Amino acid sequence: MAIEIERKFLLRGQSWRRHVHATQSLAQGYLGGDRSSVRVRIDGTEARLNIKAKVRGSARLEFEYAIPMADAKVMLHELAGAEVIKTRHLVRHGEHLWELDEFAGANSGLLVAEIELDDADEAFELPDWLGREVTEEERFYNAALVHAPFCNWIDRAAIMEELAC
């Protein structure tokens, strides 16, 4: 059994772009459930099924498995419905790897940084390109963005202003 410990932040400005060392294009959809989030993700030539407990906060149960690409495509297009499309940029800062998600489609304009930790109390360096922490705000979870995309948020303009600083 695995526990994911992840913190989320908004990204500010564009200075983070000069630190990117790898980029991935991701398409993912969610298969539903009240107590868990079941995600199908296609990342280039790899496909994975991910199951996470639906709880708010930085720590939650997580399971992930490789699946055949053909199965992933059927699940994504026939079972998931709406998709989250994003480009993930990888940036190493201090001792940690940051995943910076630049969303497209209905979530275009949203920029979120994530860091996975080994312990909930683990210390880490905060890069100057981070904005406010949104770990506790469920609407920033990818599973929530499928059903309530960024383009429909009433405070979208205010968040875009935060991202531009």
Image (cartoon, rainbow, N blue to C red):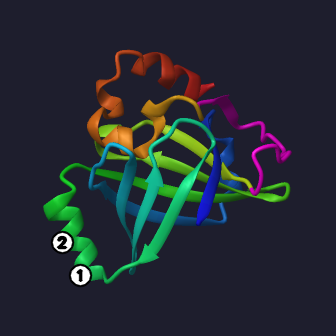
Question: In the structure shown, which secondary structural element does the residue marked by tag 1 occupy?
Answer: helix
The circle drawn on residue 49 is none
Q: Tell me the residue at 48%/47% (across/down).
A: 102
Q: Nearer the viewer, residue 160 or 56?
A: 56
Q: Which residue is mark 1?
A: 70
- Identify which residue, 49 or 55, lies in the foreground: 55
Secondary structure beneath dot 2 equals helix
**Residue 115 image point, x, y percent:** 67, 50
* Circle 2 Cα neighbour tier, 10 Å, few/some/many (<14 / 14–19 / ≥20): few
Residue 104 left/right relative to 100: left
When the figure is inspected, residue 95 is found, relative to residue 33, above or below; the finding is: below
Image coordinates of residue 7 in percent, x first then y, are 65, 42
Type of amino acid at the residue the image marks with label 2: Val
Q: Nearer the viewer, residue 34 or 20?
A: 34
Label 1 crowd bin: few (<14), some (14–19), many (20+), radius 10 Å: few
Magenta segment includes 9: no
* Quadrant in which the C terminus appears: top right
Residue 74's label in the rendered image is 2
Disc 2 from disc 1: Cα separation = 6 Å
Quadrant location, the N terminus = bottom right
Q: Are marks 2 and 1 in contact (CB under 8 Å)?
A: yes
Q: Is residue 23 above or below residue 162?
A: below
Segment colored magenta: 118-134
Left-right relation of 20 to 73: right
- Magenta span main SS: loop
